[in-house]
Image (cartoon, helix red, strand yellow):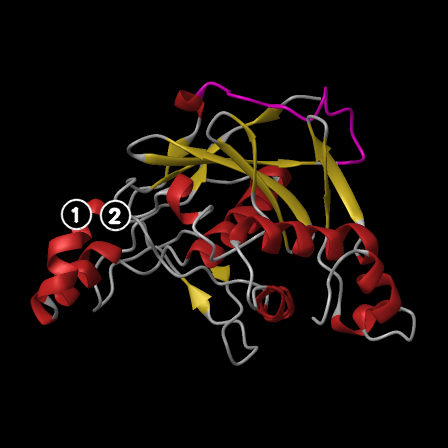
Amino acid sequence: MNHHWRRIAVPKTEVDLKTLLSCGQSFTWRETSDNVWSNVLQNKLFSVKQTDSELLWCVHHPDKDLESAKCVKSDLTAIKTEPHANTDKPTRKRVGKSGTKPEVSNTCNDDGPTLAKLSKTDNQPNIEDKADVSLEAILRDYFQLDINLGTLYDKWSVADSHFANIAASFPGIRILRQDPTENLFSFICSSNNHISRISSMVLKLAENYGTKLGSVGDIDFYSFPEAADLCKPDVEKKLRELGFGYR
């Protein structure tokens, strides 16, 4: 079954995928084709790419025929962006640092306008559309799209002349809201290491202790294991065999 690209209206100056996903902040994103990146987020296998004005995304479903798990672009004109002034639109739940799930809307707030708008096909979304809203919320939360990066860049440039000199060369770099367990173990693997080897080690953790969730092309993707899975008696011996060394 072919997968259709969904879209989020967000400029590349706010999210630069190629730089952001390869700079060493996260180690599980993989470039599965030219400028298409794939990763597991909340046990869902996503692929993302972008234009200058939009972030495009799709989800791979392992229980269906994926036709080599390649996303194909659908007719984007069929996807309507919800008007910004509509106060009847659905809200999304986002897991905050405290573990609660505050409501997130698409309306303007005191900190400036939300960057990206929900996409749906009509005013009364069907079951598939509701699933799209939930999946899109995962990406919005992960990339923290409720934060206006341009506003922060302007503020930091005023406060720091060095940042002002280099900001234009590094647009769209933001902090990702990563899974705490994955982030912690990635940090442990990063000790006295370089990005390529850190990525290899983190992927080995997923391949050996996570669950396979699907493939994109010939690349398999696994969920990152829970901390309990990495605390079993035989784990240390196995990790040494895999080349983790003192870590």
Q: Is residue 48 above or below residue 84?
A: above
Q: Is residue 23 above or below residue 11?
A: below
Q: Quadrant of residue 160?
A: bottom left
Residue 103 in the figure: left or right of residue 41: left
The residue where tag 1 is placed is 168
Residue under the image location 68 percent in, 26 percent down: 217
Read off the magenta span.
62-75
Q: Residues within 10 Å of mark 1 (few under 14, many from 20)?
A: few
Residue under the image location 51 percent in, 21 percent down: 73
Question: SS of the residue at dot 1?
Answer: helix
Q: Nearer the viewer, residue 235 or 192?
A: 192
Q: Nearer the viewer, residue 111 or 133?
A: 111
Image disc number at residue 171: 2
Q: Is residue 6 above or below residue 205?
A: above
Q: Nearer the viewer, residue 206 or 200?
A: 200
Question: Where's residue 15, x and y in %?
Answer: 34, 46
Question: Where's residue 77, x and y in %?
Answer: 39, 21
Q: Is residue 71 above or below residue 186?
A: above
Quarter of the figure with the C terminus? bottom right
Residue type pointed to by label 2: Pro
Image disc number at residue 234: none
Magenta segment main secondary structure: loop
**Can residue 18 be seen from the camera position used here?**
yes
Residue 27 in the figure: left or right of residue 24: right
Quarter of the figure with the N terminus? top right
Asked whether the residues under the numbered discs 1 and 2 touch, taking CB atoms below 8 Å apart as contact, a structural biologist would say yes
Residue type pointed to by label 1: Ala
Q: Quadrant of residue 12?
A: top left
Q: Residues within 10 Å of mark 2 (few under 14, many from 20)?
A: some
